Image: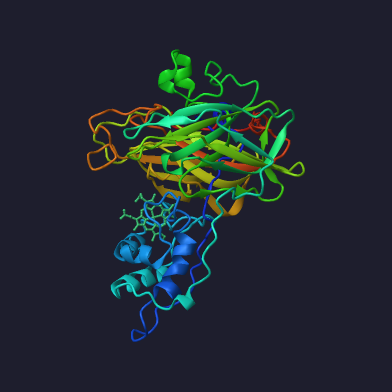
Amino acid sequence: MPLKTPAFAAAVVALLSLAAARTHETKVQAGPRDIAPPSFYRDVLPILQQHCQSCHRSGGIGPMPLVTYENARAYAQEIANFAGKRKMPPWFADPRYGHFSNDPSLTAAEIQKLAAWADASAPAGDPKDAPPPRKWIEGWNIPQPDAILKMAKPVALPAQGDVEYTYEIVPTGFAEDKWVQMSEVRPSSRENVHHAVVYIRPPDSKWLRRAPVGVPFTVSDMTDEDSRHGAHWTDSDILLVYAPGSSPDQWPPGMAKFVPAGSDLVFQMHYTTHRHAASDQTSIGIVFARQRPAQRVLTLQLTNDHFVIPPGADDYRVEARGTLPNDATLLSFFPHMHLRGKQFDYNIVGADGSVETLLRVNYDFYWQLSYRLEEPRLLKAGTMLQAVALYDNSRGNSHNPDPDASVRWGDQTYDEMMVGFFDVAVRADLDKWHYFIRPDAAAEKPASQSH
Ligand code: HEC
């Protein structure tokens, strides 16, 4: 989709922040070799608290807790390995491009400490050196929500196998327009929720109108081709995306997301199974802005749905580009592909053809994250943004469901998608339609794109 076409320029925000533990590269050098090795209580536990326990604690999405000495000692070597290879904590941005406020990565010094601790057979040290245990809130991580909207019916999940994307439509009952300052998605069965996207469906939207309200359904449940096709393909605004490790975040003062009166929320759930039957009934908590914000946050997207990835291709390139019709402050990115996704770049293309890379993601379908700019960036009207996706349809891609297939756009994970969501802040009185009206439309060259 070209950026200039409003139809898929979903407004409002899809932002999720990882534990907002942006690490600071301190200039700490490894000490002289003759000093004592790192100890669990003094050196390792603070790292685990800050970078790991958001997922590795009881009830978290990590496969094991990393809270006590006994927990960590049993995994000392794996901790050092996963940290050393930067497999943990999960983060997929190429460090050569951009700085992101939700980057949870360990510093080189922290990685070195974990390695030295494992090499020294994981000494405990003195419990008196331990930092106070980190308190994890079991309830909401945002202040008491003004509104809590929950799926009316739980979704029954099997013990094994893939679960098709599951939808549930939840009416807001909002009698007036609302501005959302904070929101948080809370699954009832966290281990089963791979990710969730909550869309705002305004009362005049035709999206999924033939679908039932208040009960879970999948695309396969739909009998008409229009609904099947349209299920994943909407111009509805996104309120929030939830993925493993995401934590709620507050919009900066003066920025908020907009929910028109009478909207429904559409929960799109991707579930995984875990060897026992389960059920999930996800809720979303919302805190409203206390006053009308100066800026409205919109989620826009760069999309190309006209591609055919040949069988076996291991580096197939698909791009989309478009020019911003009006000024906007760029806040964050959220790339979306399926199982053959390999790399996703966001670039600014200059008038002279120069390319500035804002973000490069080494893509992993199982970890779909948002990348939030440390410094929001004002982009002038006419700025050309480009998204470049690379796909690996070879046997070398261990996620590839069928290296012999020619792969096109489609809903299912064995089809592909190419969507570069990005969030911008614009004037509060601009809805997405007005944002896309070009003041000098006649004078401007049309946005080119790769269809
Ligand atoms: C955002 C959530 C999250 C964070 C933060 C996180 N992990 Fe994980 N970790 C996971 C999940 C989920 C898995 C299992 C799936 C996988 O490996 O991708 C995992 C797997 C692991 C494994 C492999 C366990 C095994 O089965 O052998 C190790 C070791 C590990 N994490 C260590 C760490 C360490 C150390 C940190 C902090 C420096 C950390 N993780 C931070 C979610 C997280």
Residue 215 is at least partly visible in this image: yes
Q: Residue at x 62, y 49 (%)?
A: 142
Whether 67 is drawn above or below 145: the answer is: below
Tell me where residue 414 appears, x and y as whole percent: 33, 30
Give the image quarter of residue 293: top right
Q: Residue at x 29, y 73 (%)?
A: 121
Judging depth in this view, the residue of 147 and 319 nearest the camera is: 147
Q: Residue furthest top?
A: 224
Tell me where residue 98 appears, x and y as whole percent: 50, 55
Number of numbered discs visible in the structure rendering: 0
Judging depth in this view, the residue of 411 and 419 nearest the camera is: 411
Whether 133 is drawn above or below 291: the answer is: below
Q: Residue at x 66, y 43 (%)?
A: 145
| 94 lies left or right of 14 | left
Ligand 1's image quarter is: bottom left
Give the image quarter of residue 147: top right
Residue 323 is at least partly visible in this image: no
| 107 lies left or right of 406 | right
